[in-house]
Image (cartoon, grey):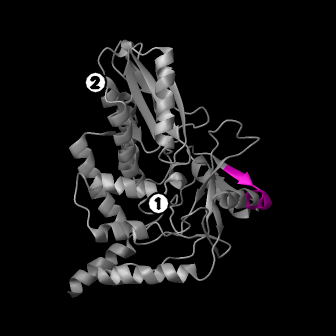
Amino acid sequence: MKPFEDDMFQIVENVKFKQVRNEFQEKLRRDVKKINSSKKVLVFADKTRNVYELDKNQYDKLLRENITTTYRKADGPIEEEINQELKHITTKSEVRDRVENMAQRQAFISLKDHKENFENNPKCSLINPAKNNLGLISKQILDRINSTIRSKTNSNQWRNTRSVIDWFSNIREKNRHSFLVFDIVDFYPSISDELLKLSLAYAKQHTTISEEDVEIIMHSRKTLLFDKDEPWVKRGDSPMFDVAMGCYDGAEVCELVGLYILHKLTSAFPDGNIGLYRDDGLAIFKNINTRSGDNVRKTFSETLGNLGLKITVQSNLKVVIYLDVTLNLTTGKYYPYRKPDNNPLYINANSNHPPSVIRQIPASISTRISGLRSIIS
């Protein structure tokens, strides 16, 4: 082994480093220095790459307003109670050694700079990083449940833009159809204990869900929000129930509830063609006039209102912007959409990314753009 060791040491000794000096690297150094020396809070935007500087007092005010809107201070040793229940479930499932207790992590916000009147009335998303670690197991269970329901019901639950484009491309006589687009307001915090149980009951019609699975899913909803080391719980009749932004299985819970929503809507409109991506919904109706479109819109609002959800909805549309693509029923075309304040950000050629990654960027961009644009002339 001695010759081998000598060769290994020789390789390390022969490694040489060089100082890279170019305008891009210098700008990075200046930016890092500016960030480290800034006394303001840097806040990321919710759906764009923008970053905003806020005074500490202004940030604390926005954070507290968003917390108190939905949460209240917890009573008693509630964190200990949750961890004791977690211990009981994980011991029974023989995974105690792999699931840690809930950690206290400070809640934070991101800014919804895509909303109207953002400059005068900023809206925020409240992010809770204090995750219930049983959510990792709940995520796997819900993934299985959701995949089974989608395959058995053929529901239009979209998971990316490509699936939306495929759905749009398969619409025949597009010019005779109209869009209805709806958005579920504050979807995550609006999911109630009752709505999740109804969704699980619907799921049991299509797949096997054990009592242990339900126990894990429901316990994963027991999440505390921490602000300055103080625990907060949801307002309302079920303070220990929360689908927190940032929890491990939050997206999967929303998908399960979304499948139940699609079931209710397609039952109300068997002739409709309705799809959903998380909290954004899209439907088409054939040969529908203004009055009928208004009736459909009201029925949509009523159906989801009965589930405890509030929506914004528009009907009788020929052109819609959905996710990051524009769909046009009149021309049959689709093409990419980008928010006005969300400029593309690419890797600089002088960055320290591997050369193979940099070489692949043009091809990747070309593939994405061509995939979001129709070839109809």
In the rendered image, the quadrant that contains the C terminus is top left
Magenta span covers which residues? 52-60
Percent x, y for residue 207? 22, 55
Q: What residue did someone put label 1 on? A: 193
Query: Vertically, is 138 above or below 90?
Result: above
User: Residue at 46% of width from left, 14% of height from top?
Assistant: 289
Percent x, y for residue 64? 71, 61
Confirm whether residue 61 shows in the render: yes
Left/right of residue 113 with respect to residue 188 in the rendered view: right
Query: Vertically, is 210 above or below 13?
Result: above
What's the residue type where badge 2 is placed?
A: Asn
Q: Nearer the viewer, residue 87 or 56?
A: 87
Q: What residue did someone put label 2 on? A: 170
Is the residue marked by circle 1 packed among few (<14), some (14-19), or many (20+) residues within 10 Å? some
What's the residue type where badge 1 is placed?
A: Asp
Percent x, y for residue 302? 50, 37
Q: Nearer the viewer, residue 344 or 207?
A: 207
Residue 5 appears in which quarter of the rendering? bottom left
Is tag 1's residue or tag 2's residue first in the polypeptide sequence? 2
Query: Vertically, is 140 above or below 294?
Result: below
Is the residue marked by circle 2 packed among few (<14), some (14-19), or many (20+) residues within 10 Å? few
Q: Residue 87 colored magenta?
A: no
User: Residue at 71% of width from left, 45% of height from top?
Assistant: 122
Q: Residue 55 colored magenta?
A: yes
Direction bottom: furthest residue = 2
User: Residue at 31% of width from left, 63% of height from top?
Assistant: 140
Residue 261 appears in which quarter of the rendering? top left
CA gap, disc 1 and disc 2? 37 Å
Confirm whether residue 158 shows in the render: no
* Nearest to viewer (mark 1 / mark 2): 1
Left/right of residue 106 with respect to residue 34 in the rendered view: left
Residue 79 appears in which quarter of the rendering? bottom right
